[in-house]
Amino acid sequence: MSVQFIVGVGSGIKVQFTEAHGPDRDALGEGAVRKREAGAARARGAVGAGIDRRGPANPCPVTTVAPTPLEPLRRSLEHRAALWSLPELPDRVVLRVSTRLRSSLGSFRPRRGEITLAAWLLDASSELREEVLCHEAAHAAVHLLYGPAVRPHGAEWKDLMTKAGFKPRVRIPFAELPESRQRAITASRVWEHRCPVCHATRLARTRVTRWRCGRCRGWGRSGKLVIERVASPIAVDG
């Protein structure tokens, strides 16, 4: 009598073993039986090792995957999260870049859990790129810690920026932008309305002659403003 064993393997290989018993074993002879059992043992070892005895497998080409531009940003985000004792932050937000950001450097959308940076920041200085990422990451951290009730650039946000070693500023001076961005912004200058007394300023796309400085008007002064066309300091948030 012979008993057949079918072994299934995850790769789809099936090996059939036949073990002889009783009269069949005697008919085969001890030498033939031992030879068959030895072959079956070798086959079982091949299956356990995941080897296809039907022939050599075609070698798979080894490909090297280049790191994506967002990987350094992801590592930086993880570093900020650890600094703020908020290790779950990297898993709660998605990083992306966009070529559509013109008047701002980045944004954070709480409902999507999404941080978006201007695409040209990937070619900017690392200092500027890190500051903008930290700026938006701090928004995400404040949202996780305190919810939507707090002010976007309030004390909570400023505290996180300070802990990360950055000045909590909302606008980046024109001179700190790359030259390519300076040229693009220069083509679309804005009007600066500045009080010559207290130096309060207000920017606008058009020249508004009726504006006055409310603080100086309260002190009994005219509050008249000096109006000049200047390059706009770009906002970090849109």
Image (spheres, grey):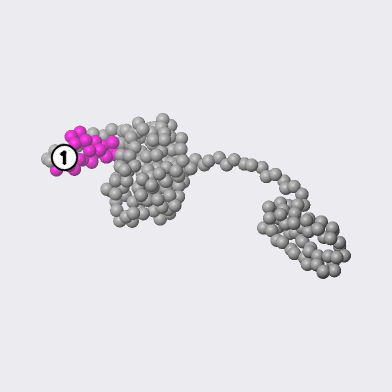
Residue 132 location, quadrant: top left
Give the residue drawn at x 68%, y 52%: 49
Residue 9 location, quadrant: bottom right
Residue type at numbered disc 1: Cys
Residue 199 is a magenta residue: yes
Position in image of residue 177 (x %, y %): 38, 33
Q: Which residues are magenta?
A: 192-218
Residue 79 is a magenta residue: no
For the N terminus, give its image quadrant. Answer: bottom right
Give the residue drawn at x 53%, y 41%: 67
Residue lying farthest to the right in this orientation: 27
Say whether residue 202 is visible. Answer: yes
Residue named by callout 1? 216
Give the residue drawn at x 84%, y 58%: 31
Position in image of residue 151 (x %, y %): 29, 51
For the C terminus, give its image quadrant. Answer: top left
Query: Position of 61 compared to 66: left or right?
Result: right
Query: Position of 222 compared to 162: left or right?
Result: left
- SS for dot 1: helix
Query: Position of 197 compared to 113: left or right?
Result: left
Say whether residue 181 is visible. Answer: no
Task: Check disc 1: other Cα within 10 Å, few if <14, some if 14-19, many if 20+.
Answer: some
Comparing 213 with 207, the one in front is 213
Comparing 158 with 198, the one in front is 158
Comparing 225 with 199, the one in front is 199
Q: Count all numbered tags in the image, as a single digit.
A: 1
Query: Position of 50 compared to 209: left or right?
Result: right
Residue lying farthest to the left in this orientation: 220
Comparing 97 with 224, the one in front is 97
Position in image of residue 164 (x %, y %): 34, 42
Position in image of residue 154 (x %, y %): 28, 48
